Amino acid sequence: MKKLIYICYGLCSLLLFNACDDFLDVRPKSEKVENEQFKDAQGFEDAIYGVYGELQNTYSYGRFMYWGFTEVLAQNLACYQDQEEIGQPLSELDYEADAVKEVIANMWEEAYKNIGYINNILKNLEGRNSMTLYNYYRGEMLAMRAFLHFDLLRLFAPTDETKEGIPYVETYSYDVKPFYKVGEVYEKILNDLNEAESLLADEENSMDYPRTDNNLRNFLNYRNTHFNLYAVWGLKARVYWMRGDMANAAIYAEKVIKSGKFPLAYRQEMADYLAGKLSEKETIFGVYSSSYLESVRTLIFNQTSFVSFSPYFESSGGGYLQTFEDIYALDNDNTAADYRMQQVNNSLWRKIIDYYTLSGESAPSGWDERYSGFTLMHVSEMYLIAAEALLDTNYDQAVSYFDEELTSRGLRGFAAQGKQLTKENIYNEYCKELFGEGQIWYNMKRLKKDIVCNSLNRVLPASDTYYVVPIPDSEYEYRN
């Protein structure tokens, strides 16, 4: 069966989304029924919730676009006998293995399918700018379109902006969409984000911490589960940072930080904020999901040797080149003080799943009121981007941002220790802070880091052979 980026156009003209946590009900619909769907604001909001709900999909951020693919490539997670037979070849960066090729094809198809949903919403919004929340609807969908294309670009394209990238799909149609050069894709991403930023500008006066979420229009509540203005700024910081434009990366990372809307968690709160719930403080954008916990129960919580995914622990006796403990020991002579390091308990990994629910332990006060789900962008990342982006132009401010993030995790700041901050220090901290969130692989790619491959017990030289995931054959077969 061909997995084409256009496969959805004949089938997804309508998104019916009965509740925020349901998966999409995608069925063939006539034009008449589609018009009925988009006849009023509620219809648009249901469709938009559908786009966010699709992010829970296994081949989207419910697994593979979050922790299930790039965390294995980055040698942060391992599994040698998983039922899908993907753990071993993926950890060896074997993109030609049948199981890996199938996952890659499904990731590609799923992302473009959701982009198709977004473009259908945008098409139906044309001429409807009199709607009260038009700016929110269009702004969020433009930002989501940029977000999905950006991750596809980082995964499937080289960093060289003159080389071929990916299709950037901006219309809802059957037409074959051209491939664009990497630099052209970046410009399209930024075009969408610039318009989204303008449309969502009113949000600069909302989302104060602590959140109230008592707006009469429910669509304006729980904004960290929508692609809000601050998520747009955060994504622009990521995009500029990935592209090497440190001046603009600093501008947008600082806009998020200086907003004061997303305070860093206290070090005493880390046990709670890394346990499979959205953080009221730190989550800039996340996915609400009550089904996510169950979907990863057997993959992470099932502590059966060689069956469940887990970090490369020193205690396993595998003689790995770089263990979980090694990562957290970098630039740190007191790992016991690192509150993140303490979140691994009997191989139960709190950053991925709800520790308290699965372990049967008493949860902290207010736990039930917090939203279930997973964070795709949080404020600590902005501190690290700002620190690196300012390191060469405003060293004191760079150290200040770096130390704020570091001390919130229970560690002493570099200034207090009299240490000189370097880009390598920031990279090491990034590896600790973003462990398990699917971002480290892209940072390695950006910096052209050699790959310390635990599964092969050797270091692989940085090259596009490893860092550019091959686009599925079906995409080219269709074009030919």
Image (cartoon, helix red, strand yellow):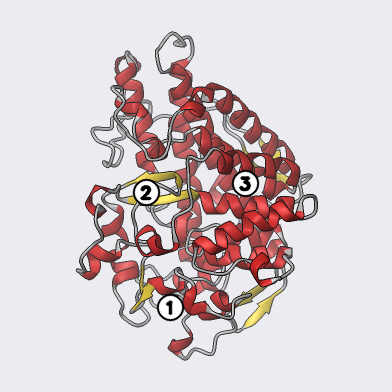
Q: How crowded is mark 2: few (under 14 residues within 10 Å), some or many (20 or more)?
A: some
**Residue nearer the viewer, 403 or 119:** 403
Decide: marks 2, 3 in contact (CB < 8 A)?
Answer: no
Closer to viewer: mark 2 or mark 3? 3
Inspect the image, locate mark 3, and give the three-letter code of the amino acid beneath it.
Arg
- The tag earlier along the polypeptide, 2 or 3, is 2
Q: Mark 3 points at which residue?
A: 238
Residue 104: where, in percent of width, then height?
A: 50, 56
Q: Distance between the residues labelled 2 and 3?
A: 23 Å
Q: Label 3's element?
A: helix
39 to the left or right of 227: left
Inspect the image, locate mark 2, and give the three-letter code of the amino acid beneath it.
Asn
Q: How far apart are marks 3 and 1 (CA)?
A: 32 Å
Q: Name the residue under label 2.
A: 57
Residue 402 vertical placement versus 238 (above, below): below
Inspect the image, locate mark 1, and give the three-letter code of the amino acid beneath it.
Tyr
Residue 289, labelled with which disc? none
